[in-house]
Amino acid sequence: MKLSIIGSGYVGLVTGACLANVDQHVTCLDIDEKKINKLRNGIIPIYEPGLEGLIKEKVASSSLTFSSNISETVKNTDVIFIAVGTPTNKENDSADLSQVYSCAEEIAKNIKNNTIVILKSTVPVGTCDKIEEIINLSNPSINFDVVSNPEFLREGSAIFDFENPDRIIIGTKEKNSISTLNSIYKKQIKNNFPVIFTTRRSSELIKYASNSMLAMRIIFINEIADLCEKVGANVEDISLGIGLDKRIGPDFLNAGPGFGGSCFPKDARALVESGKSYNAPQNLLKAVIDGNEKRKENLSKRIIEVAKNRKNIGVLGVTYKANTDDIREAPSLSIIPDLINKGFNVSIYDPQASRDGIKEFEEANWESDIYSVAKKSDCLVILTEWSEIISMDLKKISDIMTQPIIIDFRNLFSLDSFKKLNIEYHSIGRETINSHKEVE
C-alpha cells in the first residue's frame, strides 16, 4: 500500500516517519521545494525529540521519500493524507481552510479510482463534506472516500503519542475504508489502544472539543492560583486535592503563564466561530480565550511590580512549552515586547528557539546560556519548563546576581529550596520567599 502525505510540517513529518516505521511506503509532499530539498538532505525544519533520527533511518531504508510533485504522486497513491496548516483567518477567528481546499482541488484532478483521502488537519465540522464535494465536482465518476482522522500529537512527545495514542478517532462508515485504516494502524490496534469509528462530523468535532477542554482546565487552575495568592493557599495542594478525584484527574492542572502553541488558541477560537455559525454559542470557551489573553497582560504587570526600579530583566525560555522550538502564541511574544516598551533591558536564553525573523524579540539580547543571562539581569523570569532550567544551579545564580529575584511562572522549584538562599522567589499561587532580609 502506497501512502502520501500532503504537507511536510509538524503533523505531516511525524505522521510520515511513524507510518514508514511500520513497513508502509510513505511519500511526504510539499509545494515548498526548498523544504523538500532540505528534507532530502537530512535537514529537518522543526525540533522534535527523536524525529531527525527516525526520518534519516527511514529515508535510508527507502520507506520514506520526499517530493514536491503532488500531482504525479497522487496518481500513484492508494491513501492520501491531508496534513496542511489551518491557521486562524486574518479577517476573523475562524480557521483558514485555504490550504485544505487547495489540496482537495489538486487531489480532484489526479485521484485514481478507490483512493481514500484522510484528513489529518484540524478543521471545523463539515470540512470533509466540502472536500468530498470538491472532488465530486471535478471527478464525478471516480470512486473514493473522505475520512476524518484528527491528530492528537503533543509537541515534544509526538512520536510516543503516535505510537501510544490515548485513542484513534476515525470518521467514516465505509467498510473498505475501515479495513484500510485498521491496516494502517495495525500496530496500535495489536497493542490494544482504543480505536473509535464514528461519523466524519463527530470526528471533526472531537478534535476541537478535546483541545478546548484542556484549554479550559489550564485557565481554571490559573484563576484558582490567583485566588490562592489572595487568601494564602497553595495552588499545588489544590491541584493535588482536586486531581485525586477520579472524575477530574490530575492532568493539565499545573498553574502557569497560560496556553499557547499551534493548537489550543486557534482551535478554541475556531470552535467559538463554529458555534456562532450554527447558532450554538460557546460562551464558556469564549471566556477561556479572553481569560488567557488577560493572563498575559497580568504577567507583564506582575513582573514590573516585582522588579520595581530594577531595569535589567532576564527571561529563561520563550517557547510555549519545553522540548519544542515552537513559539506560536507563546506568552513570551506579548510579555517581552511589553517589558521593552516600558523601558526594561531584556536578555533571553532558550535552548531551541531562534530570534530570526521574530519582530517581538528584535530589541532583546540573546545569550548562550542561563548564567550569561543572570550576569546581565537584576531579575530572572522563567516562562518555559526546560529541564536545563529546572536543573540550574541556584547557588551559582545567587552568587552571580546582586540581590537576585526569580519570578517563576512555571512553579519549577520547591519553596523550601529558597529558604536558605539569598534569592527573592516569586511563583504562581504560592507564598513569596524573600531571603534578602536575613539569610539563615
Image (tube, rainbow, N blue to C red):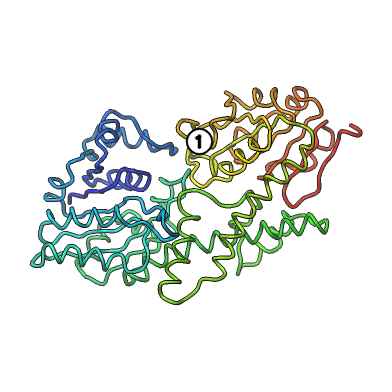
Q: Can you say whether 256 is above or below 146 in the image?
A: above
**Residue 85 shown left or right of residue 213 in the figure:** left
**Residue 378 shown left or right of residue 382 in the figure:** right
- Residue 194: x, y in percent? 40, 63
| Residue 180 falls in image quadrant | bottom left
Q: Name the residue: 55% across, 59% down.
A: 215
Q: Name the residue: 77% across, 27% down.
A: 398
Q: Name the residue: 11% across, 50% down.
A: 75
| Residue 402 falls in image quadrant | top right
Q: Residue furthest left?
A: 141
To which residue does mark 1 refer?
Answer: 359
- Residue 343: x, y in percent? 68, 33
Q: Which of 98 and 323 is in front in this view?
A: 98
- Residue 81: x, y in percent? 26, 53
**Residue 262 shown left or right of residue 346 in the figure:** left
| Residue 357 falls in image quadrant | top left
Quarter of the C terminus within the rendering: top right
Q: Name the residue: 73% across, 45% down.
A: 302
Q: What element carries label 1?
A: helix
Mark 1 residue type: Lys
Q: Which of 8 and 115 is in front in this view?
A: 8
Count of number-bearing discs: 1
Q: Can you say whether 198 is above or below 426 in the image?
A: below
**Residue 349 shown left or right of residue 230 in the figure:** left
- Residue 394: x, y in percent? 73, 30
Question: Crowdedness of circle 1 by 10 Å Cα count: few (<14), some, many (20+)?
Answer: few
